[in-house]
Image (cartoon, grey):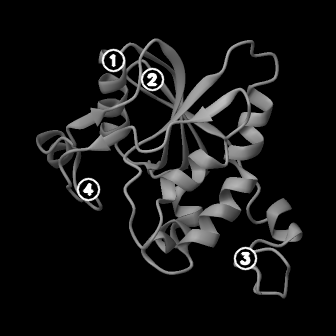
Amino acid sequence: MRCIGCYEWSWRFICPHCAKTLFQPTITMRKIGSLEVYSFYKYQHIAKYIKSKYSLIGYPTYRAFAQLTTKPFIQNFIQGLDEPIAIIGVDEEIRQGYSNVAILSHSMKTPLSIPLHRQLIAQTKVNYAGKSLDYRLSNPRNFLYRGKGGMDAVLIDDTITTGATLHEAYLTLKKHNVNVLFALTLSDAKEE
């Protein structure tokens, strides 16, 4: 196969050279209310790869990015933890035969970080792509949480734009006595 970065032949979807250069994560943090949201990339740097979720190459693309970002992040984070934490993906809706958020969540599975797949689902299916903050706030996702409470968790999504979705998800989990430590996203679409 060919590397998605340099198009050279590789055994991996992202070759080792591009993993160290072109796709080296640079973690940024943004605060949405009291929720800290950490992102691995600026959206504009990986936009065409994020948009791959709408095509057949989305699954291997997201798996490759999960191996570079969420997996090593959680392995580092759990060092020194005594109790397990939950990994909760935002609306792990299956499209194109897979869920891009579930791929990110699943890569974080360890004995001390347990993905709770499809436990936080949007009851209102609305497309926020290219929509304003006012539109997003006027059309909430109305999340339904089906998991248990009384635990610490990390919230995960693929992209943060305005933060409305993550904030609504955070508030839903808080109502169910889930202590969200922070949120992770693959990319941050905030323009500077």
Query: Of helix, strand and loop, which one carries label 2?
Result: strand
Which three-letter amino acid code belongs to the residue tagged 4?
A: Tyr
Res 9 → quadrant = bottom right
**Considering only vertical position in the picture, is 118 above or below 17?**
above
Q: Position of residue 133 (x, y in %)?
A: 23, 44
Write down the residue under mark 2. Answer: 35
The CA span between labels 3 and 4 is 28 Å
The CA span between labels 2 and 4 is 20 Å
Graded by Cα atoms within 10 Å as few (under 14), some (14 to 19) or many (20 or more), the crowding at tag 4 reads some
* Nearer to us: label 4 or label 1: 1
Q: Position of residue 116 (x, y in %)?
A: 50, 37
Residue at the image point whose x is 81% and y is 23% from the top: 79
The outermost residue toward the left is 138
First of labels 1, 2 by sequence position: 2
The CA span between labels 2 and 3 is 33 Å
Write down the residue under mark 4. Answer: 128
- The label number, if any, that marks residue 5 in the structure image: 3
- The label number, if any, that marks residue 190 in the structure image: none
